[in-house]
Amino acid sequence: MPQVLAPVYQDYYEQIYQGKEDPWDYYSAAEQAKYCHMFETAKRLKPSPLRVLDAGCSLGHLTELLADYAPEVFAFDIAKSAVERTRDRCKKLSTSTRFSVEVGDAIRPHFASASFDVVFLGDVIRNLLTEQDQQLAIRNTLALLNDSGILVLTDCMQCYHQKAYASMVENQGGLVLEKLYYHDRYWLKFRSLVKQLGRPERIRSLLGSTRVHRTLTRLGSFRGPSGSKHFGLVVRRAAA
Ligand SMILES: C[S@@+](CC[C@H](N)C(=O)[O-])C[C@H]1O[C@@H](n2cnc3c(N)ncnc32)[C@H](O)[C@@H]1O
């Protein structure tokens, strides 16, 4: 456990989880596709890792995909409620993977340096309040990677921030191996329309539709990088 958790984040996120069952529509086709893509990306580059970490795991949707991927899977989140729900989710899995899910802070992660083959850090960095926290979280997360380890990082942003985001990661000691585009610009517009309509059940169910997601993603892909609000990077530690 970390010595000091940033209370500003802990209180804020705990409140979000207390107030909503699924604060970021994780059941939706777009979120599920993002998790699958993050996982498939890691599997392609690191087919047989020993230790994997899901940092900022939220409700554990990505964490559970990691069953059977590695013998040991670690996950943490700043919000206790999220950790409890991730733990419950993992307990129900029938797998030989050993899961360890704890409260923790991405700004000061509580693991030894160089202890992971793969780290996932999905949609956490841009939610940190200051540039200093963002930089620290990236630097300290990169330090968790062993020599051949990879970080799969995603965040939601306007497309014109993608370049600065990649530069920030490089400035903190990352070497960018790949850029990941989720082409979800139109899907997010659709989601916000559904929310404005007050989410009538029949329309809301469309958020879970893979066909709607696929169609809108295809539209987004015609715009190239600017069709993506979710943007990701695969990174490893740059040589010192
Ligand atoms: C938008 S959600 C993203 C969750 C998931 N990783 C994903 O890719 O969809 C952000 C998560 O990060 C967690 N979080 C925010 N600040 C954090 C911090 N300093 N340390 C650890 N987790 C944090 C929140 O509690 C929340 O569960």
Image: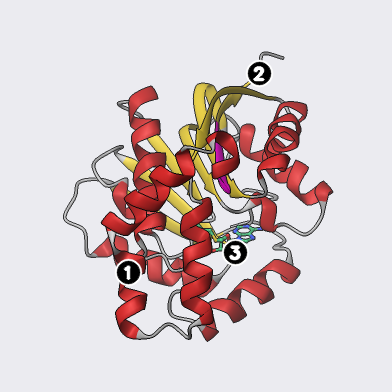
CA neighbours of label 2 inside 10 A, class few (<14), some (14 to 19), many (20+): some
- Position of residue 150 measured from the top left corner of the image (x, y, whole percent): 50, 28
Residue 232 within the magenta-colored segment of the rendering: yes
**Residue beneath disc 2:** 238
Q: Is mark 2 within 8 Å of ligand 1?
A: no
112 shown above or below 171 = below
| Sequence-first disc among 2 and 3 | 3
Badge 2 vs badge 1, beta-carbon distance below 8 Å = no
Q: Residue 206 got which mark?
A: 1
Q: Is mark 3 within 8 Å of ligand 1?
A: yes
Q: Secondary structure at mark 3?
A: loop
| Identity of the residue drawn at 46% across and 39% down | 221
| Identity of the residue drawn at 57% across and 35% down | 225
Start-end of magenta stretch: 228-233
Q: Whole-Å distance between the Cαs marked 2 and 3?
A: 28 Å
Q: Mark 2, mark 1: which one is toward the viewer?
A: 1
- Position of residue 13 measured from the top left corner of the image (x, y, whole percent): 61, 72
On the rendered structure, is 46 left or right of 158?
A: left
Q: Secondary structure at mark 1?
A: helix
| Sequence-first disc among 2 and 1 | 1
Decide whether the magenta segment is chiefly helix, strand or loop. strand
**Residue beneath disc 3:** 78
Q: Amino acid at mark 1?
A: Leu
